[in-house]
Image: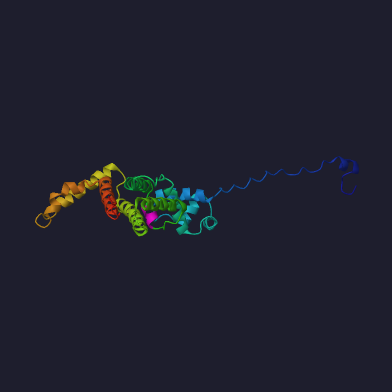
Amino acid sequence: MANGVSMSKRAKLKPARRPQFPAPAPAPSRPRVTQESLVRNALALLHQEGFDGLTMRGLAECSGIRAASLYNHVRDKAELLALIADAICAEIPPIQPAGNWRRQLRKLAVQFRAALLRHRDGARVFAATPPLSPRRLRIVEQVLTMLIRAGFSAADATAAASVHNSYIVGFVLDETLERPADRASLRRMRGQARRWFNALPREQYPTLVAFADALARTSADRHFDFGLRALLAGFAMRLPRKRT
């Protein structure tokens, strides 16, 4: 044959083996994102970075998604902050409107403050958002119901509820400003404050120098309770006197 291979030999040639390629790796599955998971991630990011470091881009990165995908679940940062505040409110037990109003408002305030302190910059989140989310509205509803049942007018009940909320959030804002991270830092800060007060000119600030130790040993818990009791006592003065 011209090509040098006979027909019989050609028939015995085996077909070429098809190359075996590895199967393509499955595409990595994207994390399942829900509004609830985003809020959990946002709380974690708040703890890590603080209020100023909580960004939509940062939340997207720690959630493993693109920033644009966030807006399928959260309209904007304002809504995200409102959702964070609502999640913190879930940690506050409900109050019984039928109980003693002063005791119940004091208990609520203590639990509210504790919830804010559990989250870095929690008070800043509340100060930056209106009370329009479901769990925050639940608290407002309970407080107003309690005050109305106690005998407050509608105007005084709404004013008292607003001032009560502002006192708690404002107090926590103030106490967490430059708050030491540990006991050792707190002792060091108190020592510095004591030395600073003692170094003041006694003839110009005699009371401050005399109270240097007391001022340096200020207890946030004691001050919160002192102010809260005074606030509730002031509310009580607005109640109409019962006829005998």
Foreground of the two, 114 or 160: 160
Taking 204 as reference, is 76 left or right?
Answer: right
Between 119 and 233, the one lying in front of the other is 233
Dividing the picture into quadrants, the one containing residue 170 is bottom left
Q: On the rendered structure, is 199 left or right of 224? A: left
Residue 50 in the image, given as x and y percentages of width and height? 39, 52
Left or right of residue 25: residue 19 = right
Residue at x 28%, y 42% (from the top left corner): 183
Tell me, yes or no, if residue 160 can be seen here.
yes
Q: How many marks?
A: 0
Q: Is residue 12 above or below residue 150?
A: above
Q: Where does residue 177 sit, x and y in percent of width and height? A: 30, 53
Magenta segment includes 126:
yes
At a point 9% along the width and 56% down the height, the residue shown is 203
Q: Residue furthest left?
A: 203
Q: Give the image location of residue 110, x and y in percent.
A: 33, 46
Residue 206 x %, y %: 11, 54
The residue positioned 53% from the left and 52% from the top of the image is 65
Residue located 30% across and 43% down the image: 182
Is 116 or 95 nearer to us in this picture?
Answer: 95
Relative vertical location of residue 98 with respect to residue 237 in this rendering, above or below: above
Q: Is residue 184 above or below residue 84?
A: above
Q: Most prominent secondary structure in the magenta stretch?
A: helix
Toward the viewer: 227 or 88?
A: 227
The image's colouring method is rainbow
- 181 in the magenta segment: no
**Is residue 199 at all visible to an observer of this figure?**
no
Q: Specify start and end residues of the magenta stretch as a single range.
A: 123-127
